[in-house]
Image (cartoon, rainbow, N blue to C red):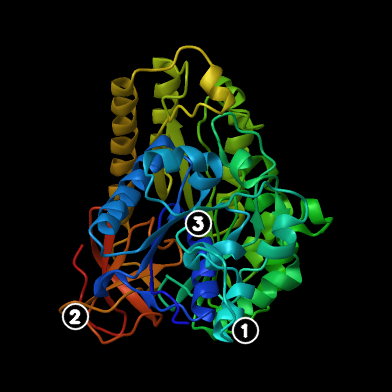
Amino acid sequence: MDMPSVSFVSLGCPKNLVDSEKMLGILAEAGCPIVSGDTGLGEVMVVNTCGFLSASRDEAVEVLSEAARHKKSGHIRRIVAAGCLVQRDGQGLMEEVPEIDALVGVHNRRDILRAVTGRSSRELRNERTEEPSSQNPQSSLLFLGEYHAGSWVDSNKSDRTRLRLTPAHYAYLRMSEGCNQKCTFCTIPSIRGPMHCKSVDEIMAEARELVEDGAVEINLIGQDTTSYGQDIDYEPGLSGLLRTMNTLDGVEWLRLMYAYPSDFTDQMIDAIAECDRVAKYIDIPLQHINDRILKAMYRRVTRKQTETLLAKLRERIPGVSIRTTFISGFPGETDAEHRELRDFIRDFGFDMLGVFPYSNEPDTPAHRIQNHLPPTVIEERVEELMLTQQEVAFGKAASRKGEELRVMIDDFGDDGVYPARHGGQAPDVDSLVYVEGGEYDPGDFVTVRCTGSRDYDLIAQPATNSLPILH
């Protein structure tokens, strides 16, 4: 039997991207030709959805509706919806886009092949030996298994043998699935289940595979990376994992993402500072700084504790870059509480920062809080916070003129200018360094000297160039 060709759309965060890469690996191993967006449409379109915010749902419905138009016009034969939004509200999604042929929840990645072909692996083997199959490939298939202790452990835990969507020189490695935190605004625990960590051996095996596949930068991700090891009784925790991964040959940068502030220990700080392969970069979503709002969010941390932690990070990790995100417009947030957050952003001077407008998600505790703010007020507050950070970031970029940096080339150059990143810049979410001069390939490391800045980005030349830098 000829396997159907597949187009794949991955929406949402890097954690969702890893799921997409794993499903693509399953399909490719089974013999499904994968069609890139540049070369047309496959016979089947898979959309891996994000369900974190209402805006994510809107995006997913838009993409699936476009797929439905392609199906009606005969350009594709089958639509498969997968991922977080499917797990959260798969039946509702099918009502909005009835052309969907199959749903695959986050705990059922192994079923993607059957969802795409309408046949099980056994039936596919039978067809290859000319045994008849009774399965109707156009029937509606639902793979929405609930989380249980063995589901992710047994069949979804390994992310090896992926077909990667990232460039060859960097990759994401998921340390764990699910989350035990109970933030009142967040839908992730209800979608992904409780936290379940991979073993150190499994993580190292995945990391070696990624390095063999060309990755020189590995970005460590999970819903809550600082709680690593708690559910598997791994006493050394994140610090032990980082020290073990630091022995991995072939990787240049190990980058920590999604750190939870209340569980950040001194041992973790020491490991980041002492391990030479660990990038001096921390992504630590803080969400707010006002004590009352933090309590309403159930973040289990106070302003004083946050400031103490941030001071430790800067003091004990020389040259550390700190990225964070905040939520603006949480229910009941007063003008004074907003100003407190604005002033904190201005005074601390984060290296990178993002602001999310509060999203009222019906199945979260925050939904039941009184005094939700009008969308226009939230939009105004988000803009003010981002403009505050913009001033900070532009000033930081301008101050780096004359500084020498080790950067990794991130893409092919255009007219001799190459986008690159230094150790304090994560892929996709942070600013860039534009290297002028030389010839490089993605993944090359180059020592450059900063010659100026353009808004958030830095401009640099190879340090071997002897051109003077005018101050």
> Which disc is residue 16 wearing?
3
Q: In this orientation, which residue lies closer to the viewer: 45 or 56?
A: 45
Image location (x, y in percent) of residue 272: 63, 62
Q: Quadrant of the rendered structure where residue 430 is?
A: bottom left
Q: Is residue 245 left or right of residue 372?
A: right
Q: Is residue 348 left or right of residue 109?
A: left
Image location (x, y in percent) of residue 395: 29, 48
Whichever of callouts 1 and 2 sits on the residue coming sooner in the sequence is: 1
Image location (x, y in percent) of residue 222: 60, 54
The residue that disc 1 covers is 249
CA gap between label 3 and label 1 equals 27 Å
Q: Amino acid at mark 3?
A: Asn
| Residue 279 seen in the current view | no
The kind of secondary structure element at disc 2 is loop
Q: Which tag is nearer the camera, tag 3 or tag 1?
A: 3
CA gap between label 3 and label 2 equals 34 Å
Residue at 84%, 55% in the rendered image: 233
Residue at 43%, 45% in the rendered image: 350
The kind of secondary structure element at disc 1 is loop
> Which disc is residue 416 wearing?
2
Whichever of callouts 3 and 1 sits on the residue coming sooner in the sequence is: 3
Residue at 31%, 55% in the rendered image: 67
Q: Which tag is nearer the camera, tag 3 or tag 2?
A: 3
Q: Quadrant of the rendered structure where residue 424 is?
A: bottom left
Residue at 29%, 33% in the rendered image: 383
Tags 1 and 2 touching, CB below 8 Å: no
| Residue 43 seen in the current view | yes
Q: Amino acid at mark 1?
A: Asp
Crowdedness near tag 2: few (<14), some (14–19) or many (≥20) residues, C-alpha within 10 Å: few
Q: In this orientation, which residue lies closer to the viewer: 333 or 106?
A: 106
Tags 3 and 1 touching, CB below 8 Å: no
Q: Is residue 57 left or right of residue 246?
A: left
